[in-house]
């Protein structure tokens, strides 16, 4: 099978190409960081399969997949997208790979592609793909089924992409245009502002205790009141945070609710 890899991240693209090089029966014939150029190539050369990132600037992977014309290749989404999208793909039996890619999962996906092509089931597969994309896009537009707050943070760092379950976060502190996200003894660097990140998180779980600090209330082990109106918060991780007087009302409300 001939394959095309489409991902705007060069490291992620090269990593997938390397892994596919270990898979018999499939050959990468082209790769692209720009979705529009990828679409032109796919339309002209008709590869058997496209490994397609969802989140790309200019044209998303979903939009690119919708514009594919017959003879349509098989599509495997390579994504760090949230669990909602994954449920839509699973419902219609559309294949996908989560970043960072598990080599065993990739081997299984390639084996499934081989069975589909040898059995001439590509047309049925493409109908499922279209149905999954339509369901996902309609639900996102309506906003009826997407969770109000993120359950997973997608953190792109040098050479890797981490899908961090939000409930595992201990606390977050700001460093300019970057957030230091502390979870299970590790620190992940997220490019964001505090206001933007706070808007993505459930305010009943994540409490602003300082201009540059946000804490998971479920990770607080002890709160000590100081005479100057500040609070010292000790987390389950052992980290100790100091609140500012600006946020004492929120901390008092938390203490009163317990």
Image: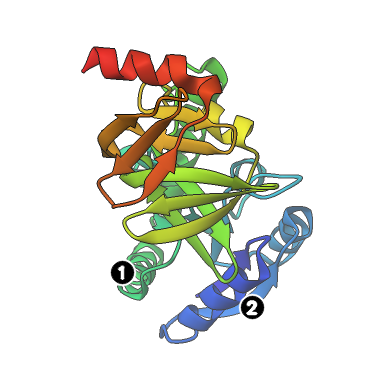
Residue 108 is labelled as: 1
User: Circle 2 sits in a helix, a strand or a loop, which is it?
Assistant: strand
Toward which corner of the image does residue 29 lie, by quadrant? bottom right
State the image quarter where residue 22 is shown: bottom left
> Which residue is farthest left?
258
Q: Kindly indicate the quadrant of the structure image that contains residue 28.
A: bottom right
Q: Is residue 76 shown to the viewer in this render?
A: no
Residue drawn at x 76%, y 45% as measured from the top left = 58
Q: Earlier in the sequence, mark 1 or mark 2?
A: 2
Q: Nearer the viewer, mark 1 or mark 2?
A: 1
* Residue 80 visible in the picture: yes
Rendered view: 152 above or below 72:
above
Residue 155 badge = none
The answer to the question of whether label 1 and label 2 lie on touching residues, with beta carbons closer than 8 A, is no
Distance CA(mark 1)–CA(mark 2): 20 Å
Categorize mark 2 by other alpha carbons within 10 Å: few (<14), some (14-19), many (20+): few
User: Which quarter of the rendered picture does the C terminus lie within?
Assistant: top left
Q: Is residue 79 above or below residue 206?
A: below
Q: Position of residue 172 (x, y in %)?
A: 48, 44
Label 2, on which residue? 29
Residue ID at (62%, 30%): 195
Query: Whole-percent x and y of residue 242?
Result: 45, 38
């Amino acid at each position: 099978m001939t394959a095309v890899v489409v991902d705007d991240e060069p490291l992620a693209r090269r990593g997938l190409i390397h892994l596919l090089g270990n898979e018999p029966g499939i050959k990468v014939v082209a790769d692209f960081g720009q979705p529009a150029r990828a679409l032109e190539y796919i339309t002209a050369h008709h590869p058997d399969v496209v490994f397609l990132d969802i989140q790309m600037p200019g044209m998303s992977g979903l939009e690119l997949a919708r514009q594919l014309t017959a003879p349509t290749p098989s599509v495997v989404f390579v994504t760090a997208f949230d669990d909602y999208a994954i449920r839509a793909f699973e419902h219609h039996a559309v294949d996908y790979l989560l970043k960072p890619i598990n080599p065993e999962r990739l081997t299984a996906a390639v084996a499934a592609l081989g069975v589909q092509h040898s059995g001439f089931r590509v047309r049925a597969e493409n109908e499922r793909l279209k149905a999954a994309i339509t369901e996902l896009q309609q639900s996102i537009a309506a906003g009826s089924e997407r969770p109000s707050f993120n359950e997973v943070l997608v953190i792109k760092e040098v050479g890797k992409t981490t899908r961090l379950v939000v409930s595992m976060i201990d606390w977050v502190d700001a460093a300019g245009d970057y957030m230091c996200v502390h979870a299970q003894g590790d620190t992940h660097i997220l490019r964001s502002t505090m206001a933007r990140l706070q808007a993505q998180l459930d305010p009943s779980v994540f409490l602003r205790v300082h201009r540059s600090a946000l804490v998971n209330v479920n990770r607080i082990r002890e709160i000590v009141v100081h005479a100057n109106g500040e609070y010292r918060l000790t987390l389950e991780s052992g980290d100790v945070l100091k609140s500012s007087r600006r946020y004492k009302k929120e901390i008092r409300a938390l203490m009163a609710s317990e």
